[in-house]
Amino acid sequence: NAGVTQTPKFQVLKTGQSMTLQCAQDMNHNSMYWYRQDPGMGLRLIYYSASEGTTDKGEVPNGYNVSRLNKREFSLRLESAAPSQTSVYFCASSPRRNTYSNQPQHFGDGTRLSIL
Amino acid sequence: DQQVKQNSPSLSVQEGRISILNCDYTNSMFDYFLWYKKYPAEGPTFLISISSIKDKNEDGRFTVFLNKSAKHLSLHIVPSQPGDSAVYFCAAKGSGGSNYKLTFGKGTLLTVNP
């Protein structure tokens, strides 16, 4: 009963290093999302993938890239990490919205990333 | 420009009493609203939702009220329990082309004292 799994759980990087955060879901959901949460802030959407093969920018996409590898997996890449990207990153998934119902997003437990 | 606002960063209540968490929104295109609960070091967990065609939705101890004219929703927890102590996020989703994206408030830390 895993739901949404994120790896790693913790990571420390130096400024300028690159890293990929992994996310996988086993609920056969079509849509996947990456958020960041900073102290005193709500969750802010970085990128999302409405369905396999598509990705779109969210509210704060600068400095990030994403790959929807297949229906299960959605990765987030920092090409050149900056201290401003120190945050907790959450991946989420949801079924595609249909006309007659809304479905909540289901979240992983997060990746805590520190950039020195 | 914050579209979903939770103006109370924290709330403290006694066990057994009612907890009322408030949320205001500015975007009239929002048509679906959710509350998430978050414990430290865990991801947010879906709690309860409401569609804009309703004004109330109840699930056990949790009730969400929606006042569309005031662009206001609230979460009532009755009776409150110490295990309810967590950060509560209000979120909203729009219709049309942006119907996949959730906009979150900053959260309210609820502390239920035994």
Image (cartoon, rainbow, N blue to C red):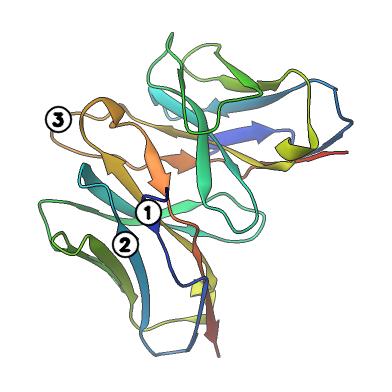
Look at mark 3 in the image and give the residue it sits on: A99
Position in image of residue A105 (x %, y %): 40, 40
Q: Which mark is residue A69?
A: none
Q: Is residue B33 left or right of residue B66?
A: right
Which residue is nearer to you in this view: A47 or B29? B29
Q: Is residue A28 visible?
A: no
Decide: is A7 above or below B112: above
C-beta proximity under 8 Å, tags 2 and 3: no
User: Which residue sits at x=85%, y=23%?
Assistant: A16
Look at mark 2 in the image and give the residue it sits on: B24
C-beta proximity under 8 Å, tags 1 and 2: yes
Position in image of residue A11 (x %, y %): 81, 36
Q: Is residue B73 left or right of residue B47?
A: left
- Provide the chain ID for the residue under circle 1: B
User: Which residue sits at x=28%, y=32%?
Assistant: B99
Give neighbour class at mark 3: few <14, some 14-19, many 20+ (Cα, 10 Å): few
Farthest residue in the left direction? B53
Q: Is residue B110 visible?
A: yes
Amino acid on which disc 1 is placed: Val
Q: Is residue B42 left or right of residue B29?
A: right
- Regarding mark 2 in the picture, which secondary structure is present there? strand
- Provide the chain ID for the residue under circle 3: A
Q: Earlier in the sequence, mark 1 or mark 2?
A: 1
Decide: is B86 above or below A17: below
Look at mark 1 in the image and give the residue it sits on: B4
Task: Report the Cα–Cα distance between label 1 and label 2.
Answer: 6 Å
Decide: is B58 above or below B51: below
- Regarding mark 3 in the picture, which secondary structure is present there? loop
Which residue is nearer to you in this view: B14 or A56? A56
Amino acid on which disc 2 is placed: Asp
